Every structure is written in C-alpha cells, then in structure tokens.
Image: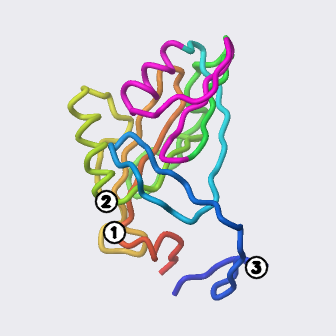
Amino acid sequence: MVRSGTGPYEAGVSRSFGPCYVQMNGPAGHTGLMVDVPRFHLAFPVDDLDAARSFYGGLLGCPEGRQDDRWIDFNLYGHQIVAHLDEHAGTGPSAHNAVDGDDVPVPHFGVLLEIDQWDVLAQRLRDAGVDFVIEPRVRFEEQAGEQRTMFLLDPAGNALEFKAFADDARVFAID
C-alpha cells in the first residue's frame, strides 16, 4: 500500500503544474530525457568556488549556468543547485542517523536517478577514486523502497546522496 499525505497530492488526485518539462543533462551523460515534474532549487554553502566548480562541474559533470564572484549555478539532472561562497562553510554534516545499518549524514541532498544512470555515476565516481561516506550499495533489499544508494562529500563537506529505486512506484511505499 502506498500512503500519501492530504490535500492536492493524495493518491488519485492530480494537480497540473503546467508544462514543466526538464531537459535532463547530468553527470551520468544522459541528455534529452524529458520528464514532466517540477524542478527544485537548492542553494548551499561552499568555502571555495574553484573547488566547487571542479567537483560539481568536473567530477559530477554538471553544466554551469549563471555565475558571479560569490556563486555558481549548476544543472544537477535538470535541477538548479547554487554553490554560494561562505568562507565559514566546510564543517561537514552536523549529525548522523542510522538507516538500514548505515550512518547517514545529516543534512544531505541528492537526486533520485534511473538505475542505469546510477550505475554509470557510481562507476564514474569509483574510477575517480572518490572516498565515499557510504559506499554504493543496495539498501532495504527485498523490502518496500529497495534502492541503490551512495553518499559522498563535496570539498566543502556538504553531503550528497544519489539513489535509484528498484521500483519508482515504491519511492514512498511504507510496506
């Protein structure tokens, strides 16, 4: 059973967001995939814009957007993330929570990918010698919400999670 919240997002109730088609250009090298979903925007602190550019643009392959001397927009699988310069950033996650045997860093952000995208990204990161916080693995195996997951830190200590569900219809499943 999939349980949802109340309001316009209840199961069986659709809400039109209008034509919000996302051009998915991202780290896994997939381009041209059109998805009818709202995009998110996330601004986060970094202590070195050149290191952020190298990590997000170089390692992850995120195309750059607009920029200034204190921030850079990146396209993370069609979502706008913005690295903002904060000379006091770089402290890393403030807490960890146990999730299926892992110490998950809090806070963290990331993207839900297709399995083939996740596989390509995981291999790209392994090939680059990334030091994972949580190595690529399957979590909740043979349970509701089975997913591939991996965690890593950017140079400023921001935690990122990339995951891919075995069944996208079970992303919010509770049983």
Whichever of callouts 1 and 3 sits on the residue coming sooner in the sequence is 3
Horizontal side of 32 relative to 76 (left or right) equals left
Residue at figure coordinates x 56%, y 12% from the top left: 48
**Residue at image mark 1:** 166
**Residue at image mark 2:** 115
What is the spatial separation of the Cα atoms under label 2 and label 1, in whole angstroms? Answer: 7 Å
Residue type for callout 2: Ile
| Label 1 SS | loop
**Residue sitting nearer the eye, 87 or 118:** 118
Residues in magenta, as a range: 50-78
Q: Is residue 27 above or below residue 9?
A: above
C-beta proximity under 8 Å, tags 2 and 1: yes
Residue 20: horizontal and vertical position, in percent? 64, 60
Whichever of callouts 2 and 3 sits on the residue coming sooner in the sequence is 3
**Residue sitting nearer the eye, 159 or 96:** 159
| Label 3 SS | loop
Residue at figure coordinates x 71%, y 74% from the top left: 16
Residue 95: horizontal and vertical position, in percent? 58, 37
- The quarter of the displayed image where residue 2 is located: bottom right
Residue type for callout 3: Thr
